[in-house]
Amino acid sequence: MKKTLYLKFILAYFIFGVFSFIIVTTFVPSMTREHLIWEKAEDLYVEAARISDTYAAGLYASETDLETVKDQLDSLAVYLDSTIRIINPSGRLVLDTGMTLNVEDEIVIENFDPTATGSAYYMVNDFFGNFDSKMLSVFSPITYNYRVKGYVVIHCDMLRIEESCNRMLNISYITLVILLLLSLIILIFFTEMVYIPLRKITYATEQYAAGNMHYEFQVESDDEMGYLAVCLNFMASQIASAEDDQKKFIANVSHDFRSPLTSIRGYLEAMIDGTIPPEMHDKYLGIVLNETERLTKLTNSLLSLNNLNTKGMLLKRTDFDLNSIIRSTAASFEGTCRKKTIAIEMILTGEAMYVNADMEKIQQVLYNLLDNAIKFSHHDSVIKVETSVKKNKLFVSVKDTGIGIPKDDLKLIWDRFYKSDYSRGKDKKGTGLGLSIVKEIINCHGEHINVISTEGAGSEFIFSLLLADSNDDED
């Protein structure tokens, strides 16, 4: 079996891991760096704005001296781990916490341009060539009498921000690795809960396709996969049972056809070669004729059973008087009953009782049931045919006082070609299809047939039919 599905799932997992790594290593560092810069700039800008409004504003308003401001900003610079400067608009350095105060030594920052930040209030560079490395520089203007007197600039070394960024990225990378390892649980879950059961089911279907319907497998799961496995097992068992029934059916048909054919051939060959003298030909031709009638009966039964397997498609429902059908069917057995001195007693409800059914097939049901009852009844006995009405149903009973049916055979009498051991010895002409045909016909009508039997005391078959509307009108 090709493991393409499993390989596809592993490939998808691998692609997921690669793309996750690419995304984390490509986008997360820049996003993290920008976020840290913005966050640090926000904090520094708050401090720069506060210095502009207090110390720097007091300095330009001559409310405090430069040395006092320098002492205050030196302490604040240590706290902020940054360098704080006050710069005139021309670029002259007024105060720098990173240098000793010297008013006589004038320092000018070349190309100083406070508008270089654009719409932002910070920038990341070497601050107009004033530093050897990149710095985060935050600007806050110093205003006095509605004029910009200078700028408070706070510088933070980007190395510190990069270190913070790297620490956060390390956490992100470790988190990614942990997530990828944890996601292996999904792969394990898929393997145990989906792939392995699916592989069992696929292998089972291959076995069934190869004709091995007796192959069984088990999937320990209560979900759809387990339900599918149960359905496949049940389907295979049903097909296997059908195949066994088919083999049994063919064997029975072969046996029931072979026996009369063997007899016919044997008798005919004996007559041809002179083993049977001419004066005995009439006797054995009669036997041959009986065997051909047996073959004809078996063939007709098989055709009837095959037509009935269409489950009612061939039914021709009409309203007819069942009582008259019972009387005419019973009359057809007059000769047989006379030979065995058997009486058929009919206890019928009403003069006429109309039912809605297929008349010919119900007549066949009655014929088969009466034929069986006569066949297995003792001499000088009585067979009762009785009808009764319950609600909108008519129940028909055919009861004999014959040999009865063994208890172990009651569940098997509806099977095709089934004959009890006793009936095989007593009825050599039977096909074993009569009750199967009866069952199929009644089932096609959507009705039921039951049997009550005691071995040595007789049997009673009871089936139901739907009453015709005309009976309700008469009531």
Image (cartoon, rainbow, N blue to C red):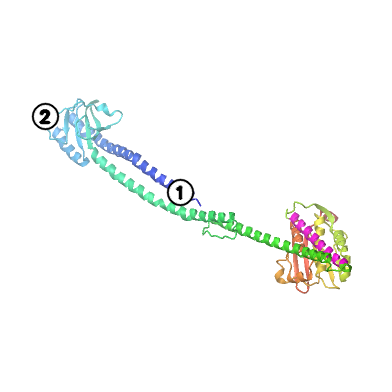
Quarter of the image where the C terminus is located: bottom right
Residue 377, percent from left and from top: 82, 71
257 and 232: which is toward the camera? 257
Above or below: residue 95 compared with residue 404: above
Q: Does residue 213 appear in the picture of this structure?
A: yes
- Given the image, on which type of amino acid does mark 1 rest? Leu
SS at circle 1: helix
Q: Which residue is mark 2?
A: 105
What's the magenta region? 281-308
Compared across the picture, whether 348 is left or right of 149 comes to: right
Q: Position of residue 378 (x, y in %)?
A: 83, 73
The residue closer to the viewer here, 438 or 460, is 438
Magenta run includes residue 289: yes
Which image quarter: residue 356?
bottom right
Q: Are marks 2 and 1 in contact (CB under 8 Å)?
A: no
Is residue 362 in the magenta section? no
| Residue 439 position in % (x across, y down) | 75, 60
Tag 2's secondary structure?
loop
Work out how far the residue at label 2 is from the one at label 1, CA to CA, in angstroms.
75 Å
What secondary structure prevails in the magenta region?
Answer: helix
The quadrant holding residue 357 is: bottom right
Q: Three-letter amino acid code at disc 2?
A: Asp
Mark number displayed over residue 467: none
For this orientation, the residue located farthest to the left is: 104
Q: Which residue is mark 1?
A: 7
Which residue is painted at 73% across and 65% down in the image?
418
- Camera-side residue of 360 and 145: 360
Q: Is residue 22 left or right of residue 321?
A: left
Q: Residue furthest front?
A: 273
Closer to us: mark 2 or mark 1? 1
| Horizontal relation, residue 288 to residue 28: left or right | right
